[in-house]
Image (spheres, grey):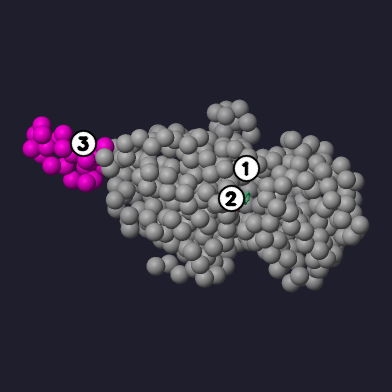
Amino acid sequence: MDIAKTVTRRTILQAGAVAAVGVSGFVPTRFAIGNTAKVKVGFLLPYTGTYAGLGEAITNAFKLAVEERGGKMGGREIQYVAVDSEANPAKGPENTNKLVTGENVDFLVGPVHSGVALGMVKVVRESGTITVIANAGAGAATGPLCAPNIFRTSFTNWQASYPMGKVAVERGLKNVVTMSWKYAAGEEALAGFEANFTKHGGKVVKQIMVPFPSDEFQANLTEIASLKPDGVFVFFAGAGALKFVKDYAAAGLKSIQLMGSGFLTDGVLKGQGEAAEGVLTTLHYADALDTPENKAFRAAYSKSFGKEADVYAVQGYDAAQLLVQGMAAVKGDTGAKPALIDAMEKAVIKSPRGTFTLSKAHNPVQDFYLRQVKGGQEIVVGVAEKALADPATGCKMG
Ligand code: BEZ
């Protein structure tokens, strides 16, 4: 879904200014002009490939949150433009530029893939475009590459995996195999798990990395069977996660505890069926959270889109909440960037996941739940880590 370049917003605004002078001699100020124009929100998300479902959920829920708030931000209507990132890191900078330069968006929302995020962050650090990362967990985006205009409503890869390291040891799992796709998200997720796991006395006996987005796991599952570990910790998401869990069960490995960050089951649990029974995960969200915000969100999402909400939808919903709060503070004046950023930094987000605030590095400080699939449902076992903040090593806000 690559929206064709039309007339840029600046061209429209300039044309509007000329027309206004011609009629009345009145020269509108920048804000007076901008206030009547629509706010342009650009989505850089995957709409094809293994992460397509994730991009769709973020887009749907972002729009839902805006609709629930009167369809406006800071009193201004919204125009959406979307570019399919294809979860392709090689196209990250080019696709970001389509939105930042080509479409002159006011706000950028996305991406899902950490590799795409790393390319995107380099572009928006230069352009200053206010960007909300609604999934990609790349640590660098709120670490060494952090910037005043870059925010995240999701997680870091470290955050979502670190809590399981301690849980695994507490459950008596001492020798574990780790496995993932070989790119930033997988590497950081496995490192986060391993840091906490070894700190508590566990041992990673083998790390297996496969190319992204391969879903040919058979040879690796045979190797895992021969290693006979106490447990297996993985990072997979989207269609790849659906297939991994099914293949794991089909390979006869169900007696070896399968663990992961919650992306392993979120959004794909129904498709995994019986194969997912018993899978243990940690995540900043769970379908079953018994709060008014979560219940209302899930009901509205399924009514609007005819499917169940998941963690990706929550992150998209909260990206919109963050921008709505920022825009309310500046009454829709996107030119008032320091005030807008200040309001976003101070935002308190009443999320379906639970209320959260942002760290100095602009990453959520949030609870991580321990979840287990029982009877086809994701059961909340407890809170594995309360108010966990990413260490944000190397972040120096300019
Ligand atoms: C990532 O690339 O950061 C990512 C993708 C899907 C789910 C979680 C993280």
Tell me, yes or no, if residue 172 can be seen here. yes
> Count the marks: how many?
3
Q: Is residue 36 left or right of residue 60?
A: left
Q: Which residue is mark 3?
A: 16
Q: Residues within 10 Å of mark 3 (few under 14, many from 20)?
A: some
Q: Amino acid at mark 3?
A: Gly
Residue, x 37% and y 47% (percent of image)?
101
Q: Position of residue 174 (x, y in %)?
A: 84, 65
List the residue tagged with mark 2. Answer: 113
Disc 1: which residue: 51
Q: Is mark 2 within 8 Å of ligand 1?
A: yes
Magenta span has 35? Answer: yes
x%, y% of residue 73? Answer: 37, 41
Q: Give the vertical position of 233 relative to 108 (above or below).
A: below
- Mark 2: secondary structure: loop
The one of 255 and 131 positioned closer to us in this rendering? 131
Name the amino acid, label 1. Tyr
In the image: residue 354, left or right of residue 325 = right
Q: Is residue 323 above or below residue 123?
A: above
Image quarter (top left, top right, bottom left or bottom right) of the C terminus: bottom left
